Image (cartoon, rainbow, N blue to C red):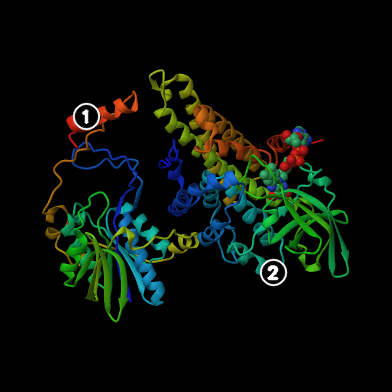
Amino acid sequence: MPQFEALDYYEIEDLLTEEERLVRDTVRSFVTEKVLPIIAHHNREGTFPVELVPEMAELGLLGANLKGYGCPGLNHVAYGLIMRELERGDSGLRSFISVQGSLVMFPIHRFGSEEQKAAWLPRLAKGEAIGCFGLTEPDFGSDPSGMTTRAVRKGNRWVLNGTKMWITNGSIADVALIWARERDQVRGFLVEKGAKGLSAREVPNKFSLRASVTSEMVLQDCEIPYENLLPGTRGLKSALDCLDQARYGIAWGVIGSAMAVFDEALRYAKSRVQFDRPIAGFQLVQRKLVWMVQEITKGQMLCWRLGKLKESGRATSAQVSLAKRNNVAMALEIARLARDILGASGITDEYQTGRHLCNLESVITYEGTHDIHTLIVGQDITGIPAFK
Amino acid sequence: MELVVCIKQVPDTETRIKIAADGKSIDITGINWVVSPYDENALEEALRIRETKGEGGVAVMTLGPERAASALRSCLALGADRAVHLQDPALEGSDSLGTARALAAAIRRSRFDLVLVGQQGVGTDNSQVGPMLAELLDIPHVNVVTKLEIANGKIRAHRQIEGAVEVVECPLPAVVTAQKGLNEPRYASLKGIMAAKKKPLERLGLQDLGLDAADVGAAGARNRWTRLELPPARQAGKILDGEPEESTAELVRLLRDEAKVI
Ligand SMILES: Cc1cc2nc3c(=O)[nH]c(=O)nc-3n(C[C@H](O)[C@H](O)[C@H](O)COP(=O)(O)OP(=O)(O)OC[C@H]3O[C@@H](n4cnc5c(N)ncnc54)[C@H](O)[C@@H]3O)c2cc1C
């Protein structure tokens, strides 16, 4: 595979600190040397590359922006760069890291008791335990407030009943953070692998995120100890706080996909000859390539600024939504255009573009669909919620 | 055991080199600078020795301009304990001997048992600094090493020679130059990157090193770059059409008559 050339049209990387650049370079080499050689195979087989987990843990990629409990405590820009470099490899791999870090470790860190933090965070950081986040249900996707999963107290235990759907890492998780209604409030519960009444089944036949595990999880009179409730969780807002973290990572991540497919398309366009000249010499092809450069550059700037806002504690949920919305849509459109430039070659997995394209169809749906983010920003600027 | 690793910051090996307007240096705009790959093997070996011995320290040193500090910091992120940056206007333009003189002066400032360097600096590819360092420090050296064992104050170093492996023993202190196969360099962990900020990076100038400006830098250089040229552009390939019998015959003819390789 030819050496990846990372687009940086406005020298935005000049804005990075030396430490941030080191983080970027480390993850970039890891992806080039360890991920790219095996990812097409995993994608074809529909398997998650578990063999990469120990090494990713060793590098410190799990919960990289959390402090203490064996986590490196990186800043938000560095965290974003990790997501971007990983997703340059594959969105499925980035999804794994997003779920582990932002949707499992972050909530334990933020809402957990001291005992929960000490018990889980170091193991999750070391990759000795894998986590998942169960919010979505078969009948409640964009509108999780309607969830039907319930937790009822029975002595010193909780009994959970309900079904969670589309859960990343579900069937390989050692611990599931399950969101359930307890009386009139949604709260988070830690359900350990092997808990009585918990079963998980992998969703088969996906054409997207094939190198990531997606599962259905059924909780049938599932009993867990009383102290497995995350004490700090208070309503759906707590779950949405986690999603904010993950969405921030996605906004950065998809730039990596876009950079990967742009690199591939540009290279291909310069070498593919039709009508006696490289197709890169045709105006219509140049227009596509230029549009890619333009959109990637805007996305890069947007994320860097969002990272700085986050570092100073000023980033709002709506700002995160706008970035997720913009960047995933641009990455998906760029992948479609890149696929087009590759011609027939673009439909095989000899090229990575098709894989990114299919992956991004999940990314534009999960963590709030494109249109749900439209409504979040719409509500923010008009003051009028348009969800119902 | 005290280990010293000398590293050089070089253009990324994937860089498309352009020649600067003066015709004798490379155009450095937009270059991504990295630690020379063989030096990464040297550092990795030092880190492993420290880890197996469970004691001692690893110091990394470089002679280079301001930007070279980032190469030192990436070595600290990989696990080196301290860094030394030799930086002085009088050191600029040093040739291999000038570089070796400055490094030797810096190495002598503290106790050391083993000096590791890459077997060559990618880009200039002179393979001189290691052996020169050993001469200046008056200690033995083993070059282009692919396997290194240390016991009882001695090293046993393996070298790949034509059709065989040569095993060389010598007492410590010594200089060893690292070949690619010596080990597989690690990645910097994110914690390592965070920890690097707090590790010492010392800057030394000509005076600290007790050197004479006439012996180092452009002033002391015994060789100078007079001209740089890019290799000639590769000619477009030729595709032979036709039936296999004909095209094979044509290929043989071309290889014999035109390319003159058979
Ligand atoms: C690969 C993958 C992994 C996932 N991982 C997880 C996970 O780990 N944990 C988890 O909890 N969930 C996960 N999800 C679920 C994901 O978050 C949901 O799919 C998403 O929230 C959308 O829900 P839905 O699929 O039910 O679509 P729906 O909500 O049914 O939406 C269908 C369509 O209707 C539109 N729509 C819905 N409401 C409105 C409205 N008010 N106005 C306008 N349009 C509207 C949507 O935009 C969309 O176009 C994952 C999904 C996928 C595909």
Judge depth for marks 2 and 1 and give the one in front. 1
Residue A157 locus on image (x, y percent): 84, 67
> Are discs 2 and 1 both within one chain?
no
Question: What residue would you read off at disc 1?
Answer: B253
Tell me which corner region of the image, top left, top right, bottom left or bottom right, holds residue B95: bottom left
Q: Going by the image, does A117 lie left or right of B226?
A: right
The amino acid sitting under disc 1 is Arg
Q: For mark 1, give the secondary structure.
A: helix
Q: Residue furthest front?
A: B245
The N terminus of chain A, quarter of image: top left
**Residue at the spot x=27%, y=38% of the render?**
B18
Indicate which quadrant contains ligand 1: top right
Q: Relative to residue B62, is residue A71 drawn left or right? A: right
Q: Residue at x 68, y 36 (%)?
A: A370
Q: Quadrant of the C terminus of chain A?
A: top right
Amino acid found under the numbered disc labelled 2: Glu
Identify the residue position indicated by label 2 in the image: A114
Whole-percent x and y of residue A321? 66, 41
Residue B213 position, x and y percent, is: 14, 59
